[in-house]
Amino acid sequence: MSYDCIIIGGGLAGLTCGIKCAKEGLRTVILSGGMSALHFSSGSIDLFGYNQRGRIITDPFEFLKDFISGGGDHPYVKTGTKVIHEAMDFFTEEVQRENLNLYNNGNNNHFHITALGTLKPTYLSQASVFSKKIKEAFERKGKIAVLEFDGFRDYYSALGIENLKKHPMFRDIEIIGGKITMPHYLRTEKNLHEFRSIDLARVFETEKYLPRLADEIKKQAGNAEIVGLPAFIGITNSTHIHRRLQEMTGLIIYEVPTLPPSLLGMRLDTALRSRFAAHGGEYSASSKVVSGVIDENRVSHVFTENYGDTKYRARTYLLSTGSFFSGGLRSGFNHMEEPVFRLKFSKPEARNKWYSKDFFDKKGHRFLEYGVETNKSLNPLDENGKTVKNLFCAGALLAGYNPIREGSGGGVAISTGYQAALKIIKECRS
């Protein structure tokens, strides 16, 4: 099987790269080992949330100008601000073509509310999480009702309310709680305690139950202006359902991410995969790449777990298998490695330096900064220190940054995936 580009890993970086390559006419396939980390994400895109001192960044692009000019091995230094801007615009436009609108706050970050009721700075969010209308309502300090579905175990409104009230932004805002009951109109053999966000999303993928739900919301919300609900408003039809529910209630409906699986993240994954297919890309969901052959500083072919000796060949390759969570990086008792090509790895310190004894250490854990080393073009080095010319790396497996401490995971994935696509397109057309 031969392609212009084989992308190993179907997460945010891989899909961004795949969409760009396929759109430019390259025969592109994504070989994925299964569910991506998007299913566990908030569904918002973090560009750069915190500086080195842990303080919140207001304007991430302004911050990046100085940060990038300082040099270093951070992935953003290798992409540059121009590519980051292009990547964010490209990503937003492509997702919107799948009827999933993403909004920013100009060049500034905005906050999204987590499942625990804490606030996190981010750059892009879905319409049910951030928009001009939502921003203005919060600025007016309108009354908020945080509601949950009775029996739903993946979201606890009381905990969210308690934490919100501790934050300075919400101290002068009245926040109430409430429960929505559904059994009188939702006929199912499944116990409501077993429902996950995906089950609710399937129920509300159409307007069938919306009028009754709207009545429940108005009853519980009282004179509140904003209603926070666990994310449930459909998967592929969320934009329409969200708009209709706001029209029926006359209220601002705000979706809060639940415990995984995250519907907001799944929505993003679905939109990206659909966009990739629309451009003619091939997506193989059960094709975990387990090894590859490098010959004369170029990848010759790769093998997958389920297809034995079948060789997948391409002119170019992208490795975007994620970090430790996704299996893109692997650790033993005293060592770490990239398991597919055994690429050069940023040298870890002694094991007791990999992590902090304080799980919630604001400085983060050092192991999150470990990963695959690349040159400025995102080409990695093999285990002998030689550049692999037709292989590029993107996303969470890259060394040199800490996505948790910085709040930069989504931005790095999209920017490096896009940068890799530009390099791949140039390579295939040369």
Image (cartoon, helix red, strand yellow):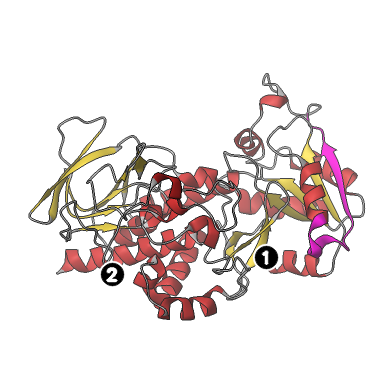
Q: CA distance from mark 2 to mark 1?
A: 36 Å
The quadrant where residue 23 appears: bottom left
Q: Secondary structure at mark 1?
A: loop
Q: Secondary structure at mark 2?
A: loop
Given contact means CB atoms under 8 Å apart, are the residues at marks 2 and 1 in contact?
Answer: no
Residue 250 visible somewhere in the drawing: no
Q: Of the residues shown, which amino acid type is indicated by label 2?
A: Lys
Q: Residues within 10 Å of mark 1 (few under 14, many from 20)?
A: some
Q: Residue at x 92, y 54 (%)?
A: 223
**First in residue order: circle 2 vs circle 1:** 1
For the C terminus, the quadrant is bottom left
Residue bearing the label numbered 1: 131
Q: Nearer the viewer, mark 2 or mark 1?
A: 2
Work out whether residue 352 or residue 56 is closer to the camera in this orientation and state it.
352
Magenta span covers which residues? 166-182
On screen, residue 403 versus residue 158, left or right, reads: left
The residue carrying mark 2 is 376
Camera-nearest residue between 89 and 112: 112
Name the residue type under label 1: Ser
Displayed quadrant of residue 260: top right
* Residue positioned most to the top: 189
Q: Is residue 174 a member of the stretch shown in magenta?
A: yes
Residue situated in front as seen by the camera: 174 or 5: 174
The residue located at (18%, 43%) in the rendering is 292
Extreme residue toward the right, this view: 223
